[in-house]
Every structure is written in structure tokens, then in C-alpha cells.
Image (cartoon, grey):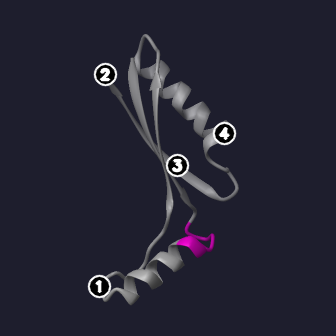
Amino acid sequence: MYLAKIIVTLRKSILDPQGKAVHHALDSLGMNAVSEVRMGKYVEMKVNSSSKEEAESVTENACRKLLANPVMEDFLYSVEKL
């Protein structure tokens, strides 16, 4: 069994209105040291697999086919044995 940890974020070229709203809210709270906020998604999946390579392949396919929009989003992941 493996645990895949996935981070999906909007590409830098895509406007992030949610990130802008959070940045504005932080600014309103006096946290002026924050210069930019980008929002994203964090996903954990338990993958039943006999090898790390197979678990990585399953994770990659899940990201490409469902979890991330290839037009607007990038993703990173790590896979570790449980």
C-alpha cells in the first residue's frame, strides 16, 4: 500500500481570483508581508500496488485524467510506502 500526496495548482498564466481574495483578506488583517497568494488543491490517495513505480503510474494517470485540468492546472505528487 502506498500513499500518494498530490498538489494541483493553477498555472502562473491563469488568473487566480480566489488567491486574490485571500491576499486581500490577509492584507486587511495587517499581514502586509504577504505579497502574493495562489490557491490550489491537495489530495491524498491510498494506492493498492505491488511496487512504487506502479503506484506512481496510477497517481500520474489519476492526475492527468481526473484531478487536474491540463489546460489550466499543473500538478506535483509524491508517493511513499505505508
Q: Residues within 10 Å of mark 2 (few under 14, many from 20)?
A: few
Q: For residue 72: magenta?
A: no
Q: For residue 14: magenta?
A: yes
Pointer 1: what residue?
Answer: 33
Disc nearer the start of the sequence (2/4): 4
Disc nearer the start of the sequence (1/3): 1
Q: Secondary structure at mark 2?
A: loop
Foreground pick, 24 / 50: 24
In the rendered structure, which amino acid carries the disc numbered 4?
A: Leu
Q: Quadrant of the C terminus?
A: top left
| View extreme (top): residue | 50
Residue 8 sits above or below residue 39 on the image? above
Q: CA distance from mark 1 to mark 2?
A: 38 Å
Magenta range? 12-18
Residue lying at 59% horizontally and 39% vertically, measured from the top left: 63
Residue lying at 34% horizontally and 86% vertically, measured from the top left: 29
Pointer 4: what residue?
Answer: 66
Pointer 2: what residue?
Answer: 82
In the rendered structure, which amino acid carries the disc numbered 1?
A: Ala
Foreground pick, 34 / 14: 34
Q: Secondary structure at mark 1?
A: loop
Residue 18 sits above or below residue 52 on the image? below
Tag in front: 1 or 3: 1
Q: What x and y, as percent, mark residue 42?
A: 46, 48
Q: CA distance from mark 2 to mark 3?
A: 22 Å
Residue 36 sits above or below residue 5 on the image? below
Pointer 3: what residue?
Answer: 75
Disc nearer the start of the sequence (4/3): 4
In the rendered structure, which amino acid carries the disc numbered 2?
A: Leu
- Picture quarter containing residue 32? bottom left
Left or right position of 53 against 30: right
